[in-house]
Image (tube, rainbow, N blue to C red):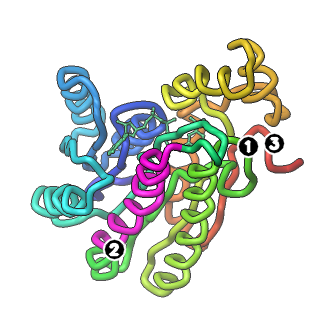
Amino acid sequence: FLTGKTALITGSTSGIGLAYAKALAAEGAHIVINGFGDADAIETERKGLEATSGARALYSGHDLTKVDQIEAMMAEAATAFGGVDILINNAGVQHVAPVDEFPVDKWDLIIALNLTSAFHTTRLALPHMKEKKWGRLIQTASAHSLVASPFKSAYVTAKHGLAGFTKTVALETATFGITANCISPGYVWTPLVEKQIPDTMKARNMTKEQVMNDVLLAGQPTKQFVTAEQVAAMALFLCRDEAAQMTGANLSVDGGWTAQ
Ligand code: NAD
């Protein structure tokens, strides 16, 4: 049902972003993937997306902490496909440290990537969506856009900001056939989660098993990790006409975490 549409997904060389790309490609959309990683592995994924969709897939490897690179990525998408119909702001990183020891460069990086990049991609995508009178803006926020955890000050700040930004954009675009929503996963088993285990072990003086069971899944009543495919299924629904009246929402996919 997405044939002829173009979806750009930031941070889609891995994890949840790649799952979005695969789900949207399966519905026939042109795809722009973005993110870092091994060039051969990315090319294999890109070709796989084209094989799945029967449409085109473009890789744009720009660093989204830099405004000029975001502008270059959006220009590449416009040149290739005329514009972006579905924008998923998903690129994000984490750093775990007490606030009084939080490295200033990590704070700046997380705010730039997890929050500010979404402002830039959105402002650049909107004119095309408004002209087409159709658009889908989707953010991968987080349970941390609704509640906090210790030692994640920059991430929690960025994700709460992203939720507020999304509500504002939803109001501004409400009469243009455009929706803007957050998807807020709990813990999804991806490289982002795997990478924060050593720092959490250090910050809390715990073993790996303790971090997984007593920290990560402690707040998730189902005691299971969310899968990237389950998150992608929500994004796919938001792209459907049936979701045209869903806007400004923050949709939890978190095993019951934020019900507590
Ligand atoms: P991941 O580490 O697997 O993927 C992150 C992606 O972002 C990768 O493609 C990476 O190359 C890209 N990226 C990193 N720095 C970048 C930069 N400067 N410019 C462009 N791309 C960059 O992580 P993930 O778990 O799939 O996370 C994706 C999103 O989901 C993030 O926004 C994260 O905060 C959010 N999220 C994850 C979880 C979880 O438990 N994994 C839970 C809630 C929300």
Q: Mark 3 or mark 2, which is nearer to you?
A: 2
Name the residue tied to disc 2.
123
Q: Are marks 3 and 2 in contact (CB under 8 Å)?
A: no
Q: Is residue 185 visible?
A: no
Main secondary structure along the magenta-highlighted residues: helix
Q: Mark 2 or mark 1, which is nearer to you?
A: 1
For the record, the magenta segment spans 103-125
* Amino acid type of the residue tagged 1 in the rendering: Pro
Secondary structure category for the residue under label 3: loop
Give the quadrant of residue 118.
bottom left
* Amino acid type of the residue tagged 3 in the rendering: Gly
Where is 59 relative to 239, above or below? Answer: above
Determine whether, in the image, residue 157 is placed left or right of residue 207.
left
What numbered label is drawn on residue 256?
Answer: 3
Tell whether position 112 is magenta: yes
In the displayed orientation, state which residue is furthest to the front: 100
Q: Residues within 10 Å of mark 2 (few under 14, many from 20)?
A: few
Name the residue tied to disc 1.
150
Spatial CA span between label 3 and label 2? 33 Å
Tell whether position 39 is magenta: no
First reached walking from the N terminus: tag 3 or tag 1? 1
